[in-house]
Amino acid sequence: MAKEKDVKTNAMRILDRSKISYKVNTYECSEFIDGVHIADMLKQPHECSFKTLVAQGKSGGYYVFALPIEEELDLKKAARSVGEKSVELLHVKDINKVTGYIRGGCTPLGMKKQYPTVVDSSAEKFDEIIISGGRLGSQIFLDPKDLVKVTGGKFEDIIFE
């Protein structure tokens, strides 16, 4: 049986197929609290640690938003960024059904479908950001421009000022 850290997630396989350079970090995670707790536990900077939120637009479409872990998604800006009148965050109980991921392991890469993706423009100032690796206890470090490229996404200001 393969060692735990050798197990690739869908997100990692997509990066491999796209020949995108990334690093993986694994850690013990018996219970997910939130990204700030994980970053503090691993002594990682909050501003380049990104969480993934999924929202549904008034049209019924799903959208993926990646933003710094301490920040809050501005639903009006988010809706504008994807051309919707409004968006609502997906309820925790629906995350797995829509994305294939669980809370705390959700990442913009490798969902059941590739939904339109918006990465907060604050990511552009970093050479590397940290996102979930696609399961609890797994992180991916990569260039935010590569994340936008592989998801077909875009950078926009989507957080509260």
Image (cartoon, rainbow, N blue to C red):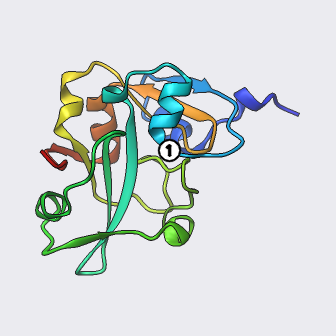
User: Image quarter for residue 141?
Assistant: top left
For residue 151, side relative to residue 25 (left or right): left
Q: Quadrant of the C terminus?
A: top left
**In front of the other: 37 or 119:** 37
| Image coordinates for residue 91, horizontal then vertical, percent | 45, 71
Give the residue type that dot 1 points to.
Answer: Asp
Residue located beneath label 1 in the image: 34
Instruction: Work out which residue is located at the far bottom of the displayed protein and give it.
Output: 59
Above or below for 107 versus 53: above
Q: Which residue corresponds to the image point at 10% horizontal and 62% vertical from the top-left? A: 80
Q: Which residue is drawn at 54% across and 36% down?
A: 12
Position of residue 128 in the picture relative to residue 43 (left or right): left
- Quarter holding the N terminus is top right
* Farthest residue, direction right: 1
Label 1 residue SS = loop
Is residue 130 toward the left or the right of residue 2 in the image? left
Q: In which quarter of the image is residue 6?
A: top right
Could you say where residue 37 lies in the image, as x and y percent from the top left? 51, 35
In the rendered view, tell whether residue 142 sits above or below residue 78: above
Tell how many labels. Answer: 1
Residue at the spot 56% in from the left edge and 46% down from the top edge: 33
What residue sits 71% from the left and 27% below the top?
A: 5
Mark 1, Cα crowd under 10 Å, few <14 / some 14-19 / many 20+, is few
Instruction: Give the x, y percent position of residue 3.
Output: 81, 28
Residue 67 % position (x, y): 30, 43
